[in-house]
Image: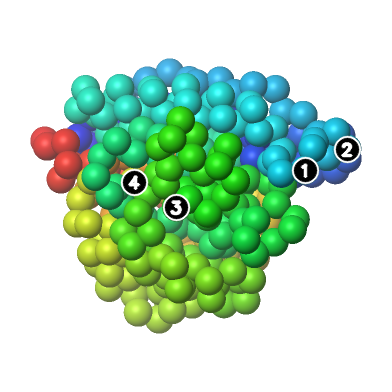
Amino acid sequence: MVDAVIALLSAPSNLGLRPPEPGGVPGTAKAPEALREAGLYGSFQSAGALDAGVVLPGRYVDDDHTRPSGRVRNEEAIVDHARRLGARISALIERGHAPLVLGGDCSLLLSAGLALAVRPAPGLIHIDGHTDFRHPGNSDECASLAGEDLAAAIGLHWPAIADIDGLGPYFAPARTAHIGCRDDDEELAEASARLGLVIPAGVAMGRGMPETAAAAITVAGGSGYWLQLDVDVLDPRWMPAVDSPDPGGLDPDELVGLLRACAPGAVGASITVFDPDLDPDGRYALLLARILRDGLGELGSRVHGG
């Protein structure tokens, strides 16, 4: 049952990902329509959700050989899309809706950050198979924002990305909780030192999803936080249709349990990195649609009311 008025918002961006091959284009831009075909929109709309349309990104360009130093791939297009998508998210929240943003790649987190940055110390629950904490202070290989989004969201990236329109940091580090990285994540130690909470996937599975979610919600402020889900938090046995699959992730039932606990207090959520090009028969779209339907049905219910 949908207690808040959930607004399904398509954000078919692939701008923050590396090309799958030289000159190639990542398939994540196809994810919203693949999920529509898998019944996601119909299941949410039958429970009262609305279709809030689409915010289209600019064209993906493999600019590795032309991009100047100090810039991420497709930077101008990412910033432009972040502003437009952020404005749409903000308008939906102001109207009392809980935006469910269907990406797309996880550079979309900047859009949510812009939408919430005017709020005092907004919180974030970041569920992802990686910390996405690469930034210019710990790497000389910054290029793909989809692997750097969490660092950018708390103000650690180049200002053109981390301080759009002077609004950074978009989320308060002390009110940011990450769940789901693997134990060998290269930025695990730094993320743990800087963020309010970091729970790797193995620890989360050991504690159980109720305890994991409760800890994250406490750090994120209890309610009114943003919920970001990168579907590569799932083990690749269940979800191989992502650009960087790593073993040691959650199973579908664990993810549903985690989302169910976190969704009611979230002001909105974004779903990223599912790649239909890696799902030729649509089976993983069907699985993801079920997970989102079962896990996010009460998105925003404690924030927006019944």
Disc 2 from disc 4: Cα separation: 35 Å
- Label 4: state its secondary structure: strand
Tags 2 and 3 in contact by the CB under 8 Å rule?
Answer: no
- Label 3: state its secondary structure: loop
Quarter of the image with the N terminus in it: top left
Q: Does 107 sit above or below residue 29?
A: below
Residue ID at (32%, 70%): 212
- Residue 55, position as x, y percentages in the image: 50, 21
Residue denoted by label 2: 65
Residue denoted by label 1: 69
Q: Earlier in the sequence, mark 3 or mark 4?
A: 3
Residue denoted by label 3: 154
Closer to the camera, 35 or 302? 302
Disc 1 from disc 4: Cα separation: 31 Å
Q: Nearer the viewer, mark 3 or mark 1?
A: 1
Q: Is residue 167 left or right of residue 22?
A: left
Residue ID at (31%, 59%): 175
Q: Nearer the viewer, mark 2 or mark 4?
A: 2
| Mark carried by residue 226 | 4
